[in-house]
Amino acid sequence: MIVTVEYSDGEVTDPLEDVTDLDRDDDNNLVATFGDGSRSTFIDGSVKKAVDDEETHKIHN
């Protein structure tokens, strides 16, 4: 899937391509896993939401 992450300050990442999974780590940070096995972590306090081609993942309730 293609994922775009929106930060709390309104900044939006370039689309992240080939994301195979969005999950949380033990510190409640958003973790994106890519098709090649690499991972990117987005610190929870700075992320507002992540949007993929299927749904919006709300970060803060």
Image: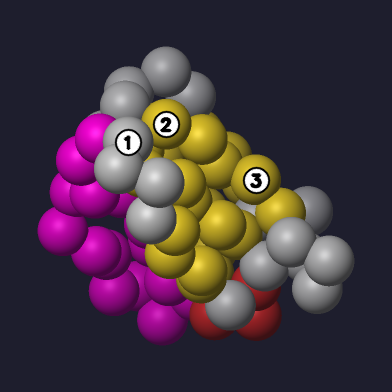
Mark 1–mark 2 CB contact (< 8 Å): yes
Mark 3: amino acid:
Asp
* Residue wearing tag 1: 35
| Residue at 42% in and 18% down | 54
Mark 2: amino acid:
Thr
How far apart marks 1 and 2 lie (CA) works out to 6 Å
| Residue at 80% in and 73% down | 27
Q: Which residues are magenta?
A: 3-18
The furthest residue to the front = 36
Indicate the position of residue 48 as horizontal and vertical percent values: 54, 63
* Residue wearing tag 2: 20
Foreground tag (1 vs 2): 1
Residue 55 is covered by the magenta coloring: no
How far apart marks 3 and 1 lie (CA) works out to 14 Å
* Residue wearing tag 3: 23
Mark 1: amino acid:
Gly
How far apart marks 2 and 3 lie (CA) works out to 10 Å
The secondary structure type at the circle numbered 1 is loop
Mark 3–mark 1 CB contact (< 8 Å): no
| Figure label count | 3
Indicate the position of residue 21 as horizontal and vertical percent values: 51, 35
Indicate the position of residue 16 as horizontal and vertical percent values: 24, 49
Magenta portion: prevailing SS class: loop
| Residue at 44% in and 58% down | 39
Q: Quadrant of the N terminus?
A: top left
